[in-house]
Image (cartoon, grey):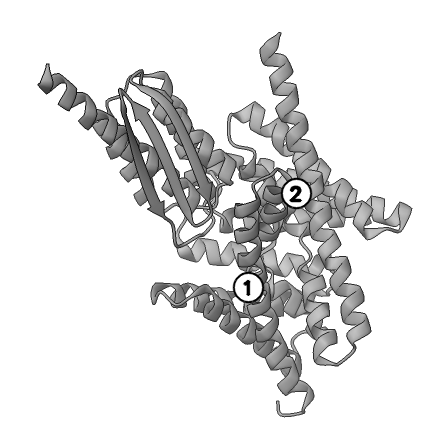
């Protein structure tokens, strides 16, 4: 039940951002599903291994792979699906809590949360880079044969 | 003979300006740098006369050199505003493929590009409504309750209306993000004081989400990892400045709030 709730929330969230970034009309639903699957995987991995960064990495990797597959399928650039899809994973809350800690002069907490925020951003980029370079090399192999 | 050469030169010039126009529309709407480079190269190479093309794209400018006959032409285009409009990226991507494969005349191509540039896409009200809905659901994802969702939705509508109004006055993104974040946190605190919503932090996190430079941060790291260091640095700088402005806005209001003024 919890998973369905999370899926629904992140689905609407991704669709909202997709429209905010003015995505083509026929890709709205696909990008929503991409983002929702990425979020659910993030939640599950984080619960199982109790590591946020691993969860974010797996979520971003899923979004990247799904985005590349959808891009191939519907002949659109992969960014169209990836940018709205990663928005739920982006560490906006980390930024807020870091700033809150600084204003309350809890500098140790600020360093802790701030570092985690940066690592989350790196994890997202890693996930996307791995999926996009995978798809590039697959394309190259297919073109040769 | 001389006439023919002159014509050829003119045509190549027009081809170059078409490629630059396509590239600058893509870059202005948030495309990755390597995609812009690919597009510019593809358009320039699509006509037989050009021997050699090399483009260098950073988020703030495009540089293209093109050799034909025994002359080299160079075009530099400065880019200033960056927003995100995925629809246009998709359209230009399709256009460049179509242009390279068919022999569409250059004039028609330029007209088509100008048409794409003028497309407005979704109306602002629709964008604001969906952006706010997304912000509300974002705070739900972080464990807010129904009242927090309502509060976050209302706050974000105000913030987005305000920032889009500010955009029309050509104010730098630093100020508009700063004001947006400050208004978001002030309104959230106010709504919680009134009794609509319980968790200030979750409402604020939802409300600043449309402003947060998540895409810029991710693109910056991605560019750096794939070897485009200059564009990585400049996107990273953009992301850091936006993040700082949001942090200043939120921090200022929280500071005033904790002093007990509101």
Vertical comparison of B143 with B76: above or below: below
The residue nearer to you, when weighing B161 against A50, is: A50
Asked if residue B139 lies left or right of residue B158, the reply is right
Vertical comparison of A124 with B74: above or below: below
Residue B99, percent from left and from top: 34, 23
Chain letter, disc 1 residue: B
Could you tell me which residue is drawn at 33 percent across and 29 percent down? B66
Residue A109, percent from left and from top: 80, 71
User: Regarding mark 2 in the picture, which secondary structure is present there?
Assistant: helix
User: Regarding mark 1 in the picture, which secondary structure is present there?
Assistant: helix
Asked if residue A16 lies left or right of residue A63, the reply is left
Could you tell me which residue is drawn at 41 percent across and 25 percent down? B42
Q: Which mark is residue B189?
A: none
Location of the N terminus of chain B by quadrant is top left
Q: How many labels does the image show?
A: 2
Residue picked out by circle 1: B241
The residue nearer to you, when weighing B186 against B111, is: B111
Q: Is disc 2 in contact with disc 1, using a CB cutoff of under 8 Å?
A: no
Q: Which mark is residue A35?
A: 2
Location of the C terminus of chain B by quadrant is bottom right
The residue nearer to you, when weighing B257 against A36, is: B257
Asked if residue A100 lies left or right of residue B54, the reply is right
Can residue B65 be seen here? The reply is yes
Image-quadrant location for residue B181: bottom right
């Amino acid at each position: 039940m919890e998973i369905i709730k999370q899926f629904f929330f992140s689905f609407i969230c991704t669709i909202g951002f997709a429209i905010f970034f003015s995505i083509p009309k026929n890709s709205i639903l696909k990008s929503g599903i991409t983002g929702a699957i990425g979020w659910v995987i993030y939640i599950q991995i984080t619960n199982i291994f109790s590591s946020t960064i691993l969860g974010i990495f797996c979520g971003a990797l899923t979004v990247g792979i799904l985005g590349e597959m959808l891009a191939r399928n519907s002949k659109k650039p992969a960014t169209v699906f990836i940018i709205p899809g990663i928005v739920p994973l982006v560490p906006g809350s980390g930024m807020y809590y870091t700033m809150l800690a600084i204003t309350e002069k809890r500098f140790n907490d600020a360093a802790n949360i701030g570092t985690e925020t940066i690592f989350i951003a790196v994890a997202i980029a890693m996930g996307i880079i791995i999926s996009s370079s995978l798809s590039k090399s697959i394309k190259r192999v297919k073109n040769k044969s | 003979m001389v006439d023919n050469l002159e014509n050829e030169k003119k045509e190549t010039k027009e081809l170059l300006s078409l490629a630059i126009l396509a590239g600058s529309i893509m870059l202005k709407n948030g495309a990755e740098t390597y995609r812009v480079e690919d597009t510019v190269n593809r358009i320039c190479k699509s006509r037989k006369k050009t021997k050699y093309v090399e483009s260098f794209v950073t988020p703030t400018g495009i540089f293209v050199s093109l050799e034909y006959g025994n002359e080299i032409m160079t075009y530099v285009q400065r880019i200033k505003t960056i927003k995100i409009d995925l629809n246009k990226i998709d359209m230009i991507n399709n256009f460049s493929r179509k242009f390279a494969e068919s022999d569409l005349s250059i004039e028609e191509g330029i007209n088509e590009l100008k048409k794409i540039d003028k497309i407005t896409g979704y109306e602002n009200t629709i964008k604001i409504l969906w952006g706010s809905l997304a912000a509300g659901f974002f705070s739900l994802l972080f464990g807010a309750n129904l009242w927090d969702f309502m509060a976050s939705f209302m706050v974000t509508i105000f913030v987005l209306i305000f920032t889009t109004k500010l955009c029309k006055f050509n104010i730098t993104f630093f100020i508009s993000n700063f004001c947006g974040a400050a208004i978001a946190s002030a309104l959230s605190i106010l709504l919680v004081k009134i009794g609509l919503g319980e968790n200030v932090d979750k409402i604020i996190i939802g409300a600043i989400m449309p402003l947060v430079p998540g895409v810029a941060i991710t693109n910056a790291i991605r560019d750096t990892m794939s070897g485009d260091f200059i564009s990585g640095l400049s996107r990273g700088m953009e992301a850091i400045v936006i993040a700082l402005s949001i942090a200043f806005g939120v921090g200022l209001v929280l500071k005033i709030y904790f002093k007990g003024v509101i």
